[in-house]
Amino acid sequence: MCDGLFGDEIPEGMVYFANYPAAGLVDRSTQEAAEAGLFRCLLDQAYLMQGVCRECGGHVDATLSVCEDHDSAGGHQCGACGTRSPVWADQRCRTCGFGKRLPIELCCLGLTPVIGFLDDREINAFAPTFEEIVNLLEVHSETSVSGDPLAVTVTISGERESVSVEFDEEMNIRSIDRPTAKAVD
């Protein structure tokens, strides 16, 4: 169903690997447990985007990896990297080693302008449904890569507006292009 969307080779029937406490499975359907796991992942990502480890409060280092031969036409996995996203963020705590490797598009969800943009479209950036996150990644986000020095731009689009975030190779934010406010009569 979503091969390569979240990366990593995973066993048949799994969506993504995540540390998930057993108590989180009690009295939850499979769908509710998956959404709770996604919520935890996106909250972790918000911490990491601020350079703070949610486990120990330590400093987080980040780098981007780019598939130079990326081809995921038609929503399929790229033959070169095995994923759908051409750019992956690797974020790791210097102190305890906690970290994540996620598509750059998911990293943007922890940034205030993107949170506001999604909220205006009635999507909770921290607790989207699984269908909303897949739709966001497959339909409403576009990632572009430019050369020397490396710059990666993620654009998340709505019906009439979009928000764009540009990163350097260490995931420092170079710029955020916020949507213009609608005129109120």
Image (spheres, rainbow, N blue to C red):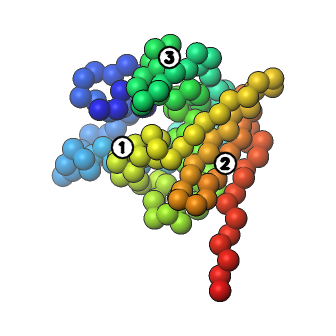
The answer to whether residue 25 is above or below residue 70 is: below
Which residue shows up at 56% across the image and 26% down it? Answer: 86
The three-letter amino acid code for the residue at tag 2 is: Ser
Which residue shows up at 29% across the image and 32% down it? Answer: 1
Q: Earlier in the sequence, mark 2 or mark 1?
A: 1
Answer left or right for 143 relative to 5.
right
Toward the top, the furthest residue is: 80
* Disc 2 from disc 1: Cα separation: 26 Å
Q: Tell me if residue 100 can be seen.
A: no
Callout 2 environment at 10 Å: few (<14), some (14 to 19), or many (20+)? many
Which residue shows up at 33% across the image and 22% down it? Answer: 10
Residue 33's x, y, as percent? 27, 46
Q: Which mark is residue 81?
A: 3
> Mark 1: which secondary structure?
helix
Circle 2 sits on which residue?
164
Answer left or right for 95 relative to 139.
right
Circle 1 sits on which residue?
37
Residue 15 versus residue 139: which sits nearer the camera? 139
**Picture quarter with the C terminus:** bottom right
Callout 1 environment at 10 Å: few (<14), some (14 to 19), or many (20+)? many
Which residue shows up at 42% across the image and 23% down it? Answer: 77
Residue 61's x, y, as percent? 67, 30
* Disc 1 from disc 3: Cα separation: 25 Å
Asked whether the beta carbons under mark 2 and mark 1 sit within 8 Å of each other, the answer is: no
Q: Tell me if residue 18 can be seen.
A: yes
Answer left or right for 19 relative to 144.
left
Toward the bottom, the furthest residue is: 185
Q: Where is residue 144, by image quadrant?
A: top right
The answer to whether residue 32 is above or below residue 76 is: below
